[in-house]
Amino acid sequence: MARFITIGERIHCISPAIREAMEKRDPGPILQRAKEQLDAGATYLDVNIGPAESNGEELMKWVVTLLQENFDNVPLCLDTANKKAIEAGISVYNRAKGKPIVNSADAGDRIDNIDLAAANDAICLALCSKHGISKDNDERMAYCQEMLERGMGLGMDPADLWFDPLFLVIKGMQDKQMEVLEFIKMCSDMGLNTTGGLSNISNGMPKHIRPIMDSAMVAMAMMCGLTSAIVNPCDRRLMETIKSCEIIRGDTLYADSYLEV
Amino acid sequence: MPFVSKPRKFNASINETVLGVGDKAVTLGGLNTLPLHFFDAPAKNPPAVGIEITDVDADLSAFPELAAFYEGAKTPAERAKKAAAAEGAQFVCLRFEGADPGGLNRSAAECAAIAKEVAEAIDLPLVISGCKNVEKDAEIFAACAEATSGKNVLFLSAREENYKTVGASTALAYGQKVGAESAVDINLAKQLNVVMTQLGIAPGSIVMNVGSAAAGYGFEYVASTLDRVKAAALEQNDNMLQMPIMTPVSAETWGVKESIMPEQDMPEWGSQEERAVAMETVTASACLASGSDAVILRHPKSVKTIAAMIAALL
């Protein structure tokens, strides 16, 4: 079985330090966050440059080149609503360590990001929603099928569509949690890859609770067959849980030092 | 319908580790297919065959062909020269049987002098193996690593109990190669590679000895261990198990009853020497089929046979 893929979420323009570094083209803070996440065990790094309407193309090229040059062609997840910026990023992207990921398409207005991924031989995160949150798994599955057909129609390998059930916040949507997990199981039974922004579930919870809740969720989701997650790799409890689950699933061979590799 | 071959290649590959120096240096590993599946991709480096000698002048009277092969060779260096000339031999393994504290108890300094003479007598890569006593092995490996500095020698092996001393005194201090020995225990095999890497030894300087058994003596555990290690290395791209594997076959097969029972005691079994060669050859071919990147054999006839088998499969 393939290894679980963690996508580090901490290069995000919502962080003031990163936003400022992106505006000023200051490599320092971006490289530091990249290093922290890679040292903590992230496989991919998400690069969120925000909507970046005016200078997105140039900015994305700059960040992609910066990160890949400094970290041995680290594979990246290109995260922006600006399609031209994603394409610009891919144009300078080195695939030695893995295909680029387009973050993201959905079954609504952003469905053409699948076309973009197909045209560029990229992986595409596919949110199983159209207008807001799907009401149940029938609806999620309908969107999943729609996006799968579109991607395959364009010649994509189904393994390059990573379906996101949309993890929902527990405070407010506690009754939906098992449904999300069941959807992951449905995708897994179909042989599809899955991912998602896991930490959304613990939004609004006290800081010391979040790693506990996130770890429990990732363990249950991995039991259902989750193949990847967008996470904060610097959350040690979470990463230890993922590595332990990988051992239990047989994704990786046990050794006493498994937490250190 | 015509047959369409679908090569099974992996995106991961076994590390390449070079032993020895100069024209005769041997590269182990590099494969990205299942063992011996040369039809899936050309072998970058075919599995290597080594020939074993010991530091003691053993009584070979039970093995006339072996005795004839080494006739006149009194010192380890002289035996090494003859061994290096054996057809199919790509490296020589010097085993310090005489260092055993329960036996001759040769000192580290004596061993170092022998290792130096042997290394200078041959141009094939040299592998040095110990006497299986963890403390003594650590001592002799340190002395031999210094004495053979610059020859890119492989030391078999560091174990859980002495990996720090052995790793530091061979690979770190003299840039030699070091084996990581685990006795048919996949988790320990990985663990040793992790801790030796954490010690600062480059993954490319580590060769695994994941243990062996003579065919018929619990070999299925060896086969499943080799299978599991290769599966982790190639299918799961586990870089803590991508070190090439060297299996000291002779150390197992020459001690089982098929190899030690004299013909006069068991006439219906036939020639003792033929039996010993058969045990060694059969076990070596099974190891190679399961994933060994190199095997160590004692009899020149076994060396020739296994080298020919590999060549025929290429």
Image: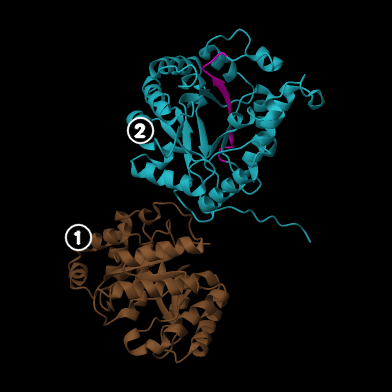
Chain colours: A brown, B cyan
Residue that protrudes farthest toward the right in the picture? B268
Chain assignment, label 2: B
Q: Residue at x 46, y 20 (%)?
A: B99
Where is A65 relative to B184, above or below? below
Chain assignment, label 1: A
Contact (Cβ within 8 Å) of mark 2 with mark 1: no
Horizontal and vertical percent position of residue B149: 38, 23
Residue B111, image quadrant: top left
Residue A243 appears in view: yes
Who is closer to the viewer here, B208 or B12?
Answer: B208
Horizontal and vertical percent position of residue B76: 52, 14
- Disc 2 with disc 1 on a shared chain: no
Where is B80 relative to A41, above or below? above
Who is closer to the viewer here, B225 or B236?
Answer: B225
Magenta range: B44-57
Q: Residue at x 44, y 27 (%)?
A: B153
- Left or right for A65, reference A189: left
Horizontal and vertical percent position of residue B240: 44, 48
Residue A11, image quadrant: bottom left
- Left or right for B1, reference B253: right
Quarter of the C terminus of chain B within the rendering: top right
Horizontal and vertical percent position of residue A250: 51, 60
Residue A28: image tag:
1
Count residues near mark 1 (Cα–Cα under 10 Å), then give few for <14, some for 14-19, many for 20+: few
Residue B165: image tag:
2
Amino acid type, mark 2? Thr
Magenta span includes B50? yes
